[in-house]
Image (cartoon, coloured by chain):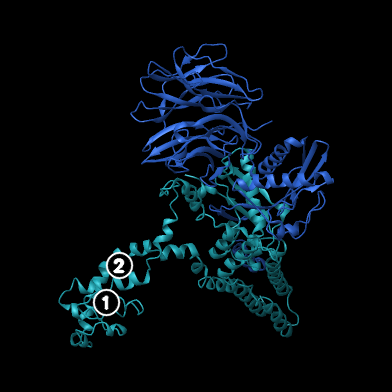
Amino acid sequence: MNPGTIISGTAHAALILFALFGGMFGRDRLPPPDVAQVSVISEEDFAALTRPDVAEEQTPATEPPMAALEVPDPPETPAPEPEPAEEPAPDPEPAAEVEPEPEPMPEPAPPAPPEITEADPAPPAPPASDDRPVAPVDVPRPAPRVSTEATPPPPPEAEEAPAVMEAPDPEPVEAPEEVVEEETPTAPPETAEEIVTEADRPTQVTNAAPDGTVRPRGRPTPPAPPAETPTAPRTEPTTSTAASDNVNEAAQEAIAGLEQLLEQAPQEGLPAGPPLTEGEREAFRLAVRQCWNVDTGSQASNVTVSIRFEMTQDARVVTSSIRQTDASGGDAAAINAAYEAGRRAILRCQNQDGGYNLPVEKYGQWQEVEVTFNPEGMRLR
Amino acid sequence: MTLLRFLIPAFVALAMVVPPVQAQDGPLRIEITEGVVEPLPFALPTFVAENPEAQEWAQRITDVVAADLTGTGLFRRIPQEAFVTQITEFTPQVTYANWKAINAQALVTGAVSVSGDQINVKFRLFDVFSEAPLGEGLQFGGSTDAWRRLAHKVSDAVYSRITGETGYFDSRVVYVSETGPKNDRLKRLAVMDYDGANVQYLTDSTSLVLAPRFSPGGERVLYTSYETGFPQIYELNVGSVNRVPLSVPAESMTFAPRYAPDGRTVIFSAAINGNTDIYRSRPGGQPEALTNAPSIETAPSYSPDGSEIVFESDRSGTPQLYIMPSGGGEPRRISFGEGRYGTPVWSPRGDLIAFTKQNAGRFHIGVMRTDGSEERLLTASFLDEGPTWAPNGRVIMFTRESAGAGGQPALFSVDVSGRNLKQIPTPNAASDPAWSPLLQ
């Protein structure tokens, strides 16, 4: 075989493989910095994490190590701070500084909150060098936990009490008001009744969500190789063999076919772009949820209904495409009522000026959507 | 072969490159398990008066429809001042954008015409965000005296189309009207619209009356009267106000009557020789005992299909709720909570039982499933008792009495969800309500 042909063929093959596999491997490198992991922390999750309950749950696990770890620390830090021993009386003033006195244990705590909690534990340690178990353990605990997690949270928890009869007023006339009060926590009427705010909320929520991972674009290199290959072989062996031409053509056709497939994918309505991140999905879910009005006393509140619909590229719902795909838990009338409630939610919560807030580059992922409305969490118990 | 050697990797690459792009398999699927609970905003422009005589009626009917819908707690009427456009003509075309702009999810338009003492009301309902009519337009006609019923029928139709449940606005309530001081109370039977309007009295105040109950058709009422000095059950025809005593066991005191779903059989409690049991009286037959126990069995109520009876018994030591077959038999206890349970009433839907509960010095109206599960207390006060279901099983009306010497009983209603507790306006003190079926 002609050496030129072999060289040409080898070069082409290398270029093709590089163009194909090199790009793929490159794609894999992009996902790691995916922001999806960050977006998982929704407002609810964040609220749950910041609840005192959670904090309290963490404390038992961290307390033992804290005590164990910080005991050795005190002996190191006490040296640079001989002042605490020198200033026994002036307790109130030193509060401004980071110098808590050994005896007044409760006082050092107040100044601690504004300060960084980790910095404070060191000072109190020296005076407690003798009383190991007491000083090191008490000081670090209250400073970070009590100060950072404010006590206010408990009140809102009282709103969760579902029982209608609990804590009724002693006055019979006021009893009805209590029942009404229990409604308010479930749905503040004023805020939710205004469609303008509801329409705007989705945008705010979706904006809060991460924009998602950058879609790895196609490989720009493929076009280059075919342009170079013809020049080299043609100059040297003018009477190039038919085999080399066939290989070139085949390679070009293969590359062109790949590019065409990739380009045609979105045009033909095929799914395109990477999957929606959890944040994007959650934002979309919240957007619809805000408009799903559940009549908890109706038979429809026992119905789980799935509704499928299509969306245009500007994230508007195609009204004519809305259809029920599945339903369970009630008779025909209840199912129809549940479907209509879901349908209204889907239509109502899209922005009046621009549909839902979804990443356009992932249109293929959400051009068809199926929402399952499951009122399980809202049923009266 | 050479060609294949180069093409194969290309196709392999093609197979490997395409799949990552097709990450989405089918539609994007999301599940929502929690929504919001809020009144549905609707627009109700004043009905169009199609002739000058209808002007006043149009306004009245519109007001009643608005009161019906908003009174459920499920709807919120948008003030007409917020309307972008006014409805001046009753046409099937509406500009949905104008109603979307004010967040109206439903739009009710209507027209009223009056000819002599005849009045016609027609309406249309639109789903604003779907931009489509919600059902066909409807028209009701009647005498001007029945204008409130016409309005209630419009409300029922709107309610039904939006919620998928039948309405309860075109219904009546029979109750005991009370006047006078607490220690010398005069009681008489009265009937009114569900909202407290159109009160009419069925008996005078010469004798004490208790516990009226509508027949399934709404044309008759059972009640207990002390006319003879002892409690005796009577059946009263609402139209003619004629009454006849019910055939009961001899030498007995009878009370707590209630119709069976067939409208002919009656169950009641009878105290004979100091022992109270539940009896059944069939047309043309003699009363038969359904229970036979030394304890007190009372307040029976049929299930909607007539197959079972729920009643109150203190056989366990305290009043509790039991269910037995309609023909009698071994009852099963369904209430196991703390306190005393009484006056059970089976929901027209058949899924719930409403009851009165006394616990820790307070009274409650509550509901539970027919197996006793999922008990929920809807109210709490000094004295709540005697629940009765709306014809659609969505609302419960009951008696609430305030404490003290000047305490007066009044009628209240509450949604089965525990929301929308409100007092029903009555001219006098009122107790013992019983809801009629939906009028025909």
Q: Are marks 1 and 2 in contact (CB under 8 Å)?
A: no
Eyeballing the image, is A210 above or below B183? Answer: below
Mark before the other along the chain sequence, 1 or 2: 2
Q: What is the crowding at mark 1: few (fewer than 14 residues within 10 Å), some, or many (at least 20)? A: some
Q: Amino acid at mark 2?
A: Thr
> What mark, if any, has residue A62 been given in the picture?
2
Whether residue B352 is visible, yes or no, is no
Q: x, y percentage for residue B98?
A: 75, 59
Q: Amino acid at mark 1?
A: Glu
Q: Is residue B242 left or right of residue A59?
A: right
> What mark, if any, has residue A78 been given in the picture?
none
Eyeballing the image, is A111 above or below B210? Answer: below
Circle 1 is placed at which residue position? A107
Q: Residue furthest left?
A: A130
Chain B drawn in what color?
blue
Q: What is the crowding at mark 2: few (fewer than 14 residues within 10 Å), some, or many (at least 20)? A: few
Q: Chain of mark 2?
A: A
Q: Where's the N terminus of chain B, which quadrant? A: bottom right
Name which residue lies at 37% across and 61% down: A53
Q: Is residue A337 left or right of residue B330?
A: right
Q: x, y percentage for residue A1?
A: 66, 75
Q: Give the secondary structure at mark 2.
A: helix
Eyeballing the image, is A95 above or below A24? Answer: below
Q: x, y percentage for residue B189?
A: 57, 29
In the picture, one chain is cyan; tell me its letter: A
Name which residue lies at 44% across and 39% down: B383
Q: Nearer the viewer, mark 1 or mark 2?
A: 1
Task: Report, in whole angstroms, how far the alpha carbon at label 1 lies from the one at label 2.
Answer: 24 Å
Q: Chain of mark 1?
A: A
Q: Give the secondary structure at mark 1.
A: loop
Eyeballing the image, is B2 above or below B234? Answer: below
Q: x, y percentage for residue A203?
A: 62, 67
